[in-house]
Image (spheres, rainbow, N blue to C red):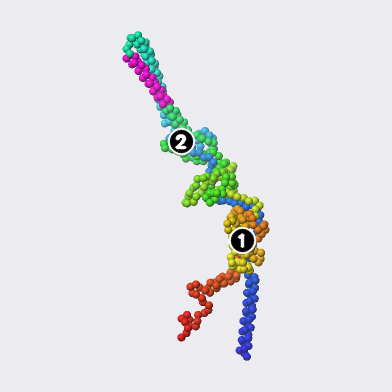
């Protein structure tokens, strides 16, 4: 009797534990539901942009050099000086060039004197020819004397022409020496501001092979150019007139604006990356921007006002079989196909019992949101962006998958139960 009573108590305890376990499992299955995260289709403005890097420079930059060699005698302009066209910037030592001018003047005077002397000789030869002709008519001189007089006249005329050429050459040498002397005074070719000065007083500049740069002038810093390098994958979206915003390190909280002025055709290849230079017009009325500053550029390539907008996470969401099973439905229905359609995407809507896929045609995107052009998702529709499975459900799904994967192994074969008595070696002896 005692043994029977003990067995009854044990069976009752096992039943109670099984009932409590079933209740807990039932409660867990009803409370541990997947968490469905949704985003709402709204209306708003959407801007698609391209980012790039660039540097600022003046619209017009002129390098002022020296065409003659010499020693810098004086400087009349320095960094950041505003200069006018024709204003003296620097002077070179003119003594050597002044000497050359004087020498050229002396050569010119000598050549002109030679012309006068040879002109007198030509006139004398002309008179001699006339006299000899008259005497030859009277048979007072021979024909040989007449020919000699004529040859002397022709020689005198040639010498006069040669002397005239020497005068022209001497005059050209004088003009060249005078121009070189004038080049010792360096003047500004434009109205602008001195951006750079490369010489000091007493420094010698040599202009034997090319003109050395003494100053760099910027025409007008109230208008500047921003040269941006656009990647080849984005250059097809850049067009003249597009709005641009950019920032520089000097003013990290200030936004500057501009417009695309030119997309240059020459490709720049650096480390196997192909970029194209894009010139952007920038207004700089307060002179905050300076040549050489590095800018982070954002080009507005497309804009949509009052468009249907949805976060990009909804377009990236793809439900798995475990998500569909955890949501209490065996399938999500026949999902529409986007094969062969441009800018087509699938959105998933959860109505509390099942997931439903909807095909939509998308427009521009800013990376975080995209535009809906058409589809059965009006404004206010809640679209699934993520499904989070509870730990218990995920563990159950994982355990089920592990069990199904370990029941039959392609290497070990089927193992339905424990090994036979006696181990893996066979039946007992």
From the image, give the main secondary structure of the stretch colored magenta.
helix
Most extreme residue toward the bottom is 1
**Camera sees residue 160:** yes
Q: How far apart in space, not on screen, are marks 2 and 1 (Cα)? A: 75 Å
In the image, the segment drawn in magenta is 144-171
Task: Using the image, determine if residue 64 lies above or below residue 121.
Answer: below
Tell me residue 312's x, y (percent): 60, 57
Q: Residue, x 50% and y 34% (percent of image)? A: 187
Q: Residue, x 41% and y 29% (percent of image)? A: 100
The residue nearer to you, when weighing 112 against 271, is: 271
Query: Crowdedness of circle 1 by 10 Å Cα count: few (<14), some, many (20+)?
Result: few
Q: Secondary structure at mark 1?
A: loop
The residue nearer to you, when weighing 5 against 81, is: 5
Give the quadrant of residue 154: top left
Q: Residue, x 66% and y 52% (percent of image)? A: 306
Instruction: Say if the magenta span includes residue 247.
Output: no
The residue nearer to you, when weighing 13 against 321, is: 321
Image quarter of the N terminus: bottom right
Res 345 label: none
Task: Using the image, determine if residue 321 lies above or below residue 53.
Answer: below
**Camera sees residue 124:** no
Judging by the rendered image, the residue that carries numbered circle 1 is: 336
Name which of mark 2 and mark 1 comes first in the sequence.
2
Q: Is residue 328 left or right of residue 201?
A: right
The nearer-to-camera label among 2 and 1 is: 1
Tell me residue 58's x, y (percent): 53, 42
Q: Residue, x 46% and y 36% (percent of image)? A: 66
Judging by the rendered image, the residue that carries numbered circle 2 is: 66
Q: Secondary structure at mark 2?
A: loop
């Amino acid at each position: 009797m005692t043994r029977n009573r003990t067995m009854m108590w044990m069976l009752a305890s096992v039943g109670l534990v099984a009932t409590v376990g079933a209740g807990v499992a039932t409660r867990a299955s009803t409370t541990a539901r997947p968490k469905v995260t949704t985003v709402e289709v709204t209306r708003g403005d959407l801007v698609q942009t391209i980012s790039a890097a660039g540097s600022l420079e003046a619209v017009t930059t002129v390098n002022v050099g020296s065409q003659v060699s010499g020693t810098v005698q004086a400087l009349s302009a320095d960094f950041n000086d505003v200069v006018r066209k024709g204003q003296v910037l620097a002077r070179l030592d003119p003594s050597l060039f002044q000497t050359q001018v004087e020498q050229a003047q002396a050569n010119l005077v000598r050549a002109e004197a030679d012309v006068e002397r040879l002109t007198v000789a030509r006139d004398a030869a002309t008179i001699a020819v006339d006299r000899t002709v008259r005497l030859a008519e009277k048979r007072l001189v021979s024909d040989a004397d007449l020919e000699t007089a004529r040859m002397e006249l022709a020689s005198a005329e040639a010498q006069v022409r040669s002397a005239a050429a020497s005068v022209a050459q001497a005059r050209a040498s004088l003009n060249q020496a005078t121009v070189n002397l004038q080049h010792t005074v360096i003047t500004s070719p434009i109205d602008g501001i001195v951006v750079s000065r490369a010489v000091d007083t007493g420094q010698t500049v040599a202009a034997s092979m090319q003109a050395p740069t003494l100053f760099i002038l910027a025409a007008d810093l109230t208008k500047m150019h921003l040269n941006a390098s656009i990647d080849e994958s984005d250059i097809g979206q850049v067009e003249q007139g597009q709005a641009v915003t950019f920032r520089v390190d000097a003013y990290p909280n200030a936004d500057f604006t501009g417009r695309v002025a030119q997309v240059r055709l020459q490709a720049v290849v650096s480390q196997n990356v192909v970029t194209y230079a894009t010139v952007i017009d920038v207004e700089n009325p307060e002179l905050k921007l300076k040549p050489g500053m590095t800018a982070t550029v954002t080009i507005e390539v497309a804009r949509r006002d009052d468009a249907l907008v949805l976060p990009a996470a909804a377009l990236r969401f793809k439900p798995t079989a475990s998500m569909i099973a955890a949501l209490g439905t065996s399938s999500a229905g026949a999902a529409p196909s986007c094969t062969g359609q441009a800018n087509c995407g699938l959105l998933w809507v959860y109505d509390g019992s099942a997931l439903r896929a909807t095909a939509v045609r998308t427009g521009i995107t800013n990376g975080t949101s995209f535009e809906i052009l058409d589809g059965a998702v009006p404004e206010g529709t809640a679209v699934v962006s993520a499904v989070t499975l509870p730990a218990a459900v995920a563990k159950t799904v994982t355990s089920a998958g592990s069990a199904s994967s370990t029941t039959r192994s392609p290497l070990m074969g089927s193992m339905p139960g424990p090994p036979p008595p006696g181990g893996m070696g066979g039946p007992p002896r």
